Image (cartoon, rainbow, N blue to C red):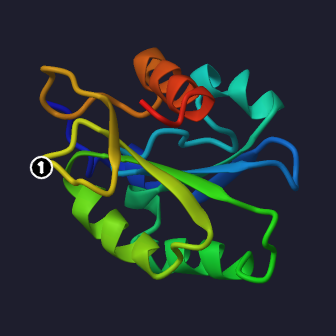
């Protein structure tokens, strides 16, 4: 089992961003703290050619809840910026609570290996792995692309 509290996961930037400003935005709230350097995981870079990816590394951002609120609040007057939020495992309930206050800005909440079922969110990947599949995994990127291209399934 991976230890998400490793010092390597807690160092580096709390938030990394890649992609065109003004584009649709995917806010990734990562409990594992991938993207420890100054960029998003390599698997996400092709997607970031057309959308903006804001990757929040929870182990490196201890006040991650206020950071999520701040990111969403910064765009509260910009009606053209919609967010799709991606998270996994144990953070799902907290993330859903946070985005409820920004429902006019959040188009969808996409979950990977959630610990429970949430009717207001869409599960894009459910693996048999424990801990949850890392958000940088290619299956997660594929699930996000599919969910964004077909919002009805």
Tell me what residue is drawn at x 21 percent, y 54 percent.
118
Can the viewer see residue 12? no
Residue 73, horizontal then vertical, whole percent: 64, 82
Residue 136, horizontal then vertical, whole percent: 47, 29
- With respect to residue 59, does 137 lie above or below? above
- With respect to residue 39, does 143 lie above or below? above
Tell me what residue is drawn at x 59 percent, y 73 percent.
104
- The residue that mark 1 highlights is 116
> Dot 1 surroundings within 10 Å: few (below 14), some, or many (20 or more)?
few
**Viewed as shown, does residue 108 lie left or right of 129?**
right
Tell me what residue is drawn at x 83 percent, y 48 percent.
23
Instruction: Specify the farthest residue to the front.
Output: 152
Q: Secondary structure at mark 1?
A: loop
**Viewed as shown, does residue 14 lie left or right of 101?**
right
Count all numbered tags in the image, as a single digit.
1
The quadrant of the picture occupied by the C terminus is: top left
Tell me what residue is drawn at x 62 percent, y 41 percent.
37
Residue 81, horizontal then vertical, whole percent: 76, 62
Instruction: Specify the farthest residue to the right.
Output: 21
Can the viewer see residue 5? yes
**Viewed as shown, does residue 1 lie left or right of 67?**
left
4 or 135, nearer to the observer: 135
Specify the quadrant of the image occupied by residue 120.
bottom left
The quadrant of the picture occupied by the N terminus is: top left
2 or 113, nearer to the observer: 113
Specify the quadrant of the image occupied by residue 18.
top right
Residue 79, horizontal then vertical, whole percent: 78, 72
């Amino acid at each position: 089992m991976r230890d998400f509290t490793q010092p390597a996961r807690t160092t580096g930037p709390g938030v990394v961003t890649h992609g065109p400003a003004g584009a649709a935005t995917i806010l990734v709230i990562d409990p594992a703290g991938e993207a420890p350097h100054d960029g998003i995981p390599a698997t996400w870079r092709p997607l970031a050619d057309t959308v903006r990816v804001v990757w929040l590394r929870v182990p490196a951002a201890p006040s991650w809840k206020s950071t999520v609120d701040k990111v969403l609040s910064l765009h509260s007057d910009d009606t053209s910026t919609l967010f799709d939020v991606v998270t996994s495992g144990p953070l799902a309930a907290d993330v859903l609570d946070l985005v409820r206050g920004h429902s006019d800005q959040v188009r969808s909440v996409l979950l990977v290996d959630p610990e429970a079922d949430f009717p207001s969110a869409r599960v894009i990947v459910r693996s048999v792995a424990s801990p949850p599949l890392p958000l940088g995994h290619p299956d997660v990127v594929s699930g996000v692309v599919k969910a964004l291209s077909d919002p009805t399934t």
